[in-house]
């Protein structure tokens, strides 16, 4: 009995060598809170760096796509002996067609003419069909039209097999309403993914081709624009031959994307690298007062990660005329003025694309993260002079 009682007693706790009682392992609430605090501090330090790296990677990918368009334009010029037009002047377009496609058929030439003058494109601006409409083939669509691949048929590069336009009608072959965009184009000058084009609806292999289910762009014509993989608004192509061109349709030679609200507006950039430009001015050539960036070739412009090109502004917030242009290196604003004595006297007292100082309705500076083919660094902001 005494032995059983002895065994049932709790064993004595032996003191450690230091003379203290050994406790169970574990974390106290204070220790856990300290660890959580440290993790939070580290996350606060690391996440901005991660976000910054992601933004840099996306911006770099847009820059690489611009470089792809650059190569495509070089390929096109090598093959056809001329850079493509941007659609803002029929005179330039027609001259290019004569030079690049000397055997061009009357069907292809007339079809392109009708696309630039057709009432279906914009009946409100062009009810008679005889007035040139400068944004029918706009600065974004020109990239896809000319670089996406042309037919090997020398007389029908646009309507032949592998060309940009596929005939789906049964009537007049020069009617733009009888064509859809051809997603199976041959020999492209640049690698343009169909999935990144503003096509609606996307074609399906089983769908019968007809006028009722034509493959068109988001603005209803057979020419889509191209959107970079990290963006939501198109890449733009400005042809140097029409940088300062003001058409007879009262176009301001800018670009406005209708597919996304708040995408902004933009004109080609000017420069302080090649002053002074024209010494005398008229309403037609006042935009030439200071030099242009890439004066003999072209400008490719992306709206950047904010999907906002910026703002086209005039001398007041309520008007866009006379035209105004931003200088790429400084972000100064040149407001065209036929009474000015020099190009530099047209410069407003703003720097760094400070749009709000000119137009109070602007809430963002969309120019700063724009990406172009003429900047040494990626974003416009990174290239600004001190």
Image (cartoon, rainbow, N blue to C red):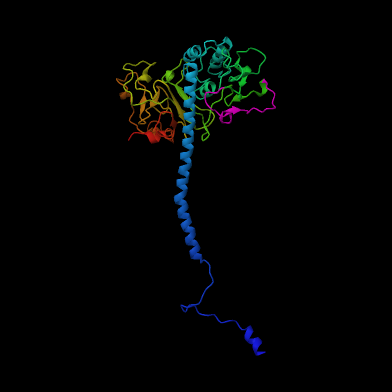
Up the image or down, 70 lies above or below 101; here it is below
Question: Residue 3 at x, y = what percent?
Answer: 65, 88
Frontmost residue, 196 versus 7: 7
Q: Which residues, given as a range, are shown in magenta? A: 187-210
Left-right relation of 122 to 337 = right
Up the image or down, 76 lies above or below 194; here it is above
User: Was residue 191 drawn as part of the magenta stretch in this picture?
Assistant: yes
Left-right relation of 40 to 224 = left
Up the image or down, 114 lies above or below 347; here it is above
Frontmost residue, 273 versus 327: 273
Question: Residue 232 at x, y = what percent?
Answer: 53, 33
Viewport quadrant of the C terminus: top left
Frontmost residue, 76 versus 144: 76
Question: Residue 130 at x, y = what percent?
Answer: 53, 11
Q: How many marks?
A: 0
- Whether residue 85 appears in this view of the structure is no
Viewport quadrant of the N terminus: bottom right
Magenta segment, principal secondary structure? Answer: loop
Frontmost residue, 337 versus 133: 133
Q: Residue at 31%, 24% (x, y): give it.
A: 344
Q: Residue furthest left?
A: 341
Q: Residue at 63%, 84% (x, y): give it.
A: 7
Question: Residue 237 at x, y = what percent?
Answer: 47, 24
Q: Quadrant of residue 376?
A: top left
Q: Residue at 45%, 27% (x, y): give it.
A: 300
Q: Residue furthest bottom?
A: 2
User: Was residue 352 drawn as part of the magenta stretch in this picture?
Assistant: no
- Whether residue 64 appears in this view of the structure is yes
């Amino acid at each position: 009995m005494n032995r059983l009682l002895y065994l049932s007693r709790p064993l004595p706790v032996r003191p450690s060598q230091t003379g203290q009682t050994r406790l169970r392992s574990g974390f106290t609430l204070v220790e856990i809170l300290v660890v959580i605090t440290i993790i939070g501090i580290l996350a606060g330090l690391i996440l901005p760096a991660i976000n910054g790296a992601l933004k840099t990677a996306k911006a770099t990918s847009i820059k690489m796509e611009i470089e792809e368009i650059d190569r495509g334009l070089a390929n096109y010029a090598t093959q056809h002996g001329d850079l493509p037009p941007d659609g803002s002047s029929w005179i330039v377009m027609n001259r290019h067609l004569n030079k690049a496609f000397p055997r061009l058929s009357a069907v292809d030439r007339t079809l392109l003419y009708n696309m630039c003058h057709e009432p279906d494109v914009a009946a409100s601006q062009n009810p008679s069909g005889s007035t040139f409409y400068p944004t029918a083939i706009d600065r974004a669509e020109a990239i896809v039209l000319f670089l996406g691949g042309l037919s090997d048929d020398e007389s029908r590069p646009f309507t032949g097999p592998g060309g940009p336009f596929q005939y789906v009608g049964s009537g007049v072959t020069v009617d733009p309403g009888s064509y859809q965009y051809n997603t199976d184009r041959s020999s492209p000058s640049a690698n343009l993914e169909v999935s990144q084009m503003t096509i609606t609806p996307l074609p399906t292999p089983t769908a019968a081709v007809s006028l009722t289910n034509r493959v068109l762009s988001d603005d209803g014509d057979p020419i889509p624009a191209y959107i970079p993989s990290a963006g939501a608004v198109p890449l733009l192509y400005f042809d140097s031959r029409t940088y300062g061109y003001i058409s007879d349709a009262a176009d301001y030679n800018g670009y406005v994307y209708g597919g996304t609200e708040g995408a902004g507006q933009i004109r080609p950039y000017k420069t302080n690298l090649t002053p002074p430009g024209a010494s005398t001015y008229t309403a037609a050539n006042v935009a030439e007062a200071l030099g242009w960036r890439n004066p003999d070739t072209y400008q490719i412009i992306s709206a950047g990660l904010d999907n906002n090109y910026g703002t086209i502004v005039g001398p007041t917030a309520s008007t866009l005329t006379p035209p105004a242009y931003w200088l790429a290196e400084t972000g100064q604003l040149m407001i065209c003025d036929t009474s000015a004595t020099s190009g530099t006297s047209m410069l407003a007292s703003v720097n760094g694309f400070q749009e709000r100082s000119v137009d109070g309705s602007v809430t963002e500076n969309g120019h700063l993260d724009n990406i172009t083919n003429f900047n040494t660094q990626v974003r416009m902001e990174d290239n600004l002079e001190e």
